[in-house]
Amino acid sequence: MLSEREKRKLGREKLQRIIETCKSVDGRSLDPFLVDVKENIDTVKKYFPEWKVPEDLCLDAETIHQLASVIKLQSEWVKHRSTTLYADPFLLDEKIRRMGRVDLVRTFIEVWHPIVELEQISIQSLAEALRYWESLTPLSGRWSQMAPEEVASSIATREELVNERILRDKAFSQELESFWQELKERVEKEGEKGKMRYEAFVYAETYDETASRAFMTSFLVTYGYATLEIHPLEEETFIVPYERPMVKTGDKQLVSIPIALSLEGWQEWRRGRTG
Amino acid sequence: MSKRKAYYASKLKRATHMLFYKRHRKPGVKGWELRKALGSDYPKVLRILDDYLKPLDLQVKTIFDEEIRVEKPTQEQLDKARFLIELRGELTPRETKMIDWRIDDLAGLAIAIAYIISKKGKSPRKEVEELLREKLPGWKVGINVDRYVRYGYLAQDENQQLYLDWRTRAEVDEKALVDLLLRTEP
């Protein structure tokens, strides 16, 4: 009677062998029907309950993947045999090994129709090339034009870097916190049932500011300060702030939600406000 | 000359220029390029050109994007296809020399193509080279296979597997080659 450990070891070896066989069939163009897919699937099934660690599960997935590749090869093999191009490979191999060079070439040129293609310069293109050459500035002249300007260097102040948007005037976490507070306040004033329309919160007086608010909102959602409520049929998206940041736990898969932020959409919103 | 005739005569000229002269790295012109230059009735212009080329032993060949044979192509398939001019009939062995093919190199190409067809369109490079080495000097084998790949007759993937590439599909009647080889008495 094998112990659990020994059973797992044997199972791993068997799966490795299946993977190697499948790979050699694919790599060396062997007959894919040499692989008994049903028997191998039974082996994979038999050992599946034994796998506990991710490495073993990956090995299991890789085996299934390789077997699927063999099934694909089997289907291609059947298709190829049913086409008019099918010829016994051994017979063809034997023929080409036995034929002399001259006979081979004679046979080949009966079925070879080389492409016709010309390369020729015309008098017009020569004339055009000459005109171009005449108008071309000599390299020495072009390099002198491209000499780099001398710029006086000095130390930039923090304010200048903030103005150039290289540095932010607040740390990002502080900025996110105050943005979250703003969301909570606005939901309390303008929202309904603890939520407000995404556009109502994100859209601002300028498009640049709108883009920046959308960027910050995406971080509010990612870091658990708020969540999105999407009503696909009504094509409405609401933003719901949390009272305290939620820590994402459990094995739930995170999803990305793309929200279009078009210039036209923003202009329409502005027109609606001003008009 | 009637207006209609003059219309097609000018289109024929334009199509001839486009198809005969080298425009891209790969020979030929895409369907969408022809549609842009000749208008939507470019397939008709190409049919007329093909008739003109018949007595000269040349033809307009259509290479579709897919490897499968297309009987009645749609507009989209035609736009994606590549059109080129090729020899309609056959060359004589002496003529092959004029187009820069030595008999050894051409025999090697024929063997490589036939062998890959016999292996369902895919074969390890090593096997093709071994076969070529039986009749070609060893130092030449690798150079020749590289040349076939460079010209577009064969393609090679990262696993050193060789496949038939676009130029073989364009220039070689694969079915006829297999039939001829099987019929030949060594």
Image: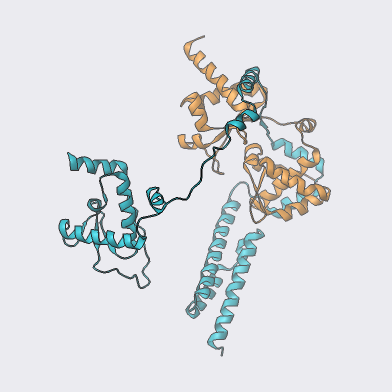
Chain colours: A cyan, B orange
- State the residue in front, A257 or A76: A257
* Percent x, y of residue B143: 76, 46
- State the residue in front, B36 or B135: B36
Residue displayed at 63% across by 68% down: A20
Residue displayed at 54% across by 58% down: A72
Residue displayed at 47% across by 25% down: B41
Query: Residue A261: in sight, yes or no?
Result: no
Direction right: furthest residue: B137
* Percent x, y of residue A105: 77, 39
- State the residue in front, A186 or A238: A186
Query: Residue B122: in sight, yes or no?
Result: yes
In which quadrant is the C terminus of chain A drawn? top left
Direction top: furthest residue: B1
In which quadrant is the N terminus of chain A drawn? bottom right
**Taking A96 as reference, is B157 left or right?**
left
Quadrant position of residue A183: bottom left
* Percent x, y of residue A34: 63, 65
Q: Looking at the picture, does residue B36 appear above or below residue B164?
A: above
Quadrant position of residue A110: top right
* Percent x, y of residue A217: 31, 57
Residue displayed at 78% across by 48% down: B141
**Taking A177 as reference, is A87 left or right?**
right
- State the residue in front, B93 or B176: B93
**Taking A237 as reference, is B121 left or right?**
right
